[in-house]
Image: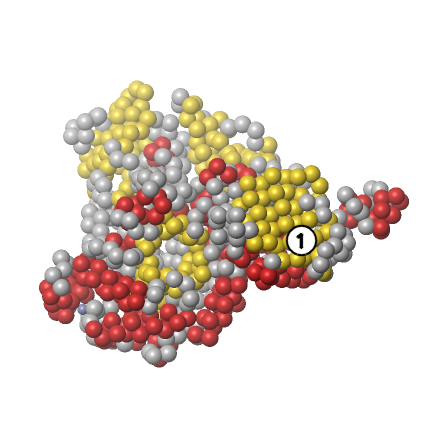
Amino acid sequence: MRYPYYLILFLVFLPIGCANKLQQIDKIGIIPQPLELSTIQGEFIFDEAVSVNSDEKLYTISSYFRQFLKEKADISTKTGVLKKQITFSIDNGIDNDEGYTLTVLKDRIEIRAKTKKGAFYAVQSLLQLFPANIDKTKPVTIPCLKIRDEPRFQYRGMHLDVGRHLYSVDFIKKYIDLISQLKMNTFHWHLTEDQGWRIEIKKYPKLQEIAAYRNETLVGHYNNQPHQFDGKRYGGFYTQEQIKEIVTYAQKRYVTIIPEIEMPGHSQAAIASYPELGCLNKPTEVATKWGVFEEVYCPKESTFKFLEDVIDEVVALFPGKYIHIGGDEAPKIRWKNCSHCQELIKQKELKDEHGLQSYFIQRMEKYINSKGKQIIGWDEILEGGIAPNATVMSWRGTKGAVEAAKEGHNVILTPTSHCYFDYYQSDSENEPLAIGGFLPLEKVYSFNPIPKELTKEESKFVLGAQGNVWTEYIRTEQQVEYMAFPRAIALSEVVWSSLERKNYEDFVNRLEQYQQRLDQQNVNYANHIYEVKGKLKNNNRTLSYVLSTTSKTNDIYYSINGNEPNQLYQKPIPINRTTVIKAVVKNTNNEVLGNVFEQKINLHKGVGAKIIINKEPHPSYNAGGKEALINGISGSNKRFGDKEWLGFWGEDIEIMIEFEKPIAIKSISTRFYNGNGQWIYAPDKIFISFDKSSSANVSKVNIPKKDPLIVNSKTTFINTKARYIMLTIPNYGIIPKGKQGAGNKAWTFIDEIIIE
Ligand code: ACM
Ligand code: ZN
């Protein structure tokens, strides 16, 4: 290690103060985790003149790095050969266009890549070797190492819906900047919606005058009936000049923008400005609440002309190869009742309205292909026959991805189960209002974009994955940041890092350090890594409660029945009566990190019994397993996606609870979720019997539906003793007309079955 003259003086006279004069990161913690990383003894210290030399092709990247050094660390660099040097070289021996090598030695930093993009990613890794908060008065030290890196997937994206709420140009740039730091290369910009059209189209001025504004906005959650509105006009749009500015900004960060122009559904705002685009040819308004709307484009020649004109202007603004045409959630009711649509179905010999949707998308694909671009559509574009060259974005689970890949189409995974960052990320009751669902950080991290059903050959069609940020309940830029981060950070590792290198615990350690970089950039990220989680353990009917937290460097303290949580947690807490547990995470200075966790365990007679369900819950809503129904813990009153609720889609279910020996039963209570806006319906009735065969001694229980969201029922029994309880829960059936999701099967969500 070579010290500058003044440091040598310190070494001689002030040996203890020396270490404080250098600054360095606590530990190497690059996100996303590189493919190969080996540390080397020693450090590169910025304590004397440093030269930066670059292949001409990489000059923009080396300049970008020099600018960082100057602005953030007050380090000026020279060209030419100095004792300490940084070099940027093109290396055609690197296979992957996005790959790079980064070598840090005591006197040299070498960046090698095949392309500018690879070199840009090398710099992103290099920047994470600098401390987050650089003190310009002290020399910076970065650890010696060698990295060889390349992405696992070619498509690494984040989406943002600006239709429901829109955000400033500066914020869109910040979002792009933040995702580029994570080596994400795509920004999917959802620009048109029922509630607002956000892209200036010069040929159609009413899109700016009418479609860009709504009269008011729903207040609170859609599930809270009756609906209330704020009475305030809301809206705006991005001018073509602003869009060009954003596109250029993104290009400099190697982020491609995919614009989404929704068709045939989610187009009520456009139809409000030009009613002739719809089947009814009648005035409508820009939507003021959330959901799926029946006004969709009518496939008339004049509608196609409008859409082609729109595409012409869109194509001119976005240099990337893809245009997203939406295709999701397009109700067919208007088409069913429209003479033009029905005539067209006959004339084109289409099977039905799904065939018509397929015709619509294929026709637009042909036009978009003629402009040298490819289409992406949500997985509904598979219904009625997929357009020949389309890429499918699979959001309703992974079924669409499997089907499309097997048909030889490229796919991008964005399943609600792992990629919907508008869902809640914590089951804390203090979370800001969100659409529903439950998608914690660890679940995002656990995602593998290659569905199990695909062979190795078929899995080559999986281009990658994307996080979606739908913004019905996200009014502010700070809230976008809260929902997107840190889940986008976990996703960056899903799409970049190799499976072998993924490790959640290690990720969380690196995330703690990465948060300092987010703090530096004023990002309002959510921090749940100091949250306590609890789980009831049933060991041969001996019950205990296990506490855990993600960050392993801190301790959990707890209390039982109301005291301050100051008892160090070391082993599972025995549970032999109804108990309230409070817990917090504290650091070594005894400071509380994160929020207080509180859980009541209601030790009713069913807790710890054996349970069998004749159907598996849906894989997206099975987090707690079947035992969650009799673990003494009731799920959230606000959301159905936590680990206490089990979700079943369209199925009748039978639940058998078995005790060791017959017990006295006085009552059985059930809880159903009834969020009709999310296709969830409590059953009208259930059946209870105390025999293993459900046909004997059946009681029919009519389920009351007074409370719109949570439906409780309690059935009492006199002089009943039984070893078995059989519950038969018929599905509600098909969602009725006029409701969200009409015509689809309803979901059943059930929570704790309390037996007393
Ligand atoms: C979607 O979430 N409607 C694609
Ligand atoms: Zn029509």
Query: What residue is drawn where x is 24% and y is 68%?
Result: 297
Question: Quadrant location of residue 605?
Answer: top left
Q: Is residue 50 left or right of residue 194?
A: right
Q: Is residue 327 visible?
A: yes
Q: Nearer the viewer, residue 157 or 132?
A: 157
Whole-percent x, y for residue 540 in the image: 40, 21
In the rendered view, would you say 738 is above or below 579? below
Question: Quadrant location of residue 194?
Answer: bottom left
Whole-percent x, y for residue 145 in the image: 64, 42
Query: What residue is drawn where x is 45% and y is 70%?
Result: 243
Q: Where is ligand 2, by quadrant?
A: bottom left
Whole-percent x, y for residue 438 in the image: 40, 47
Whole-percent x, y for residue 627 in the image: 36, 32
Q: Residues within 10 Å of mark 1 (few under 14, many from 20)?
A: many
In the rendered view, would you say 131 is above or below 728? below
Q: Which residue in the structure is indicated by mark 1?
A: 86
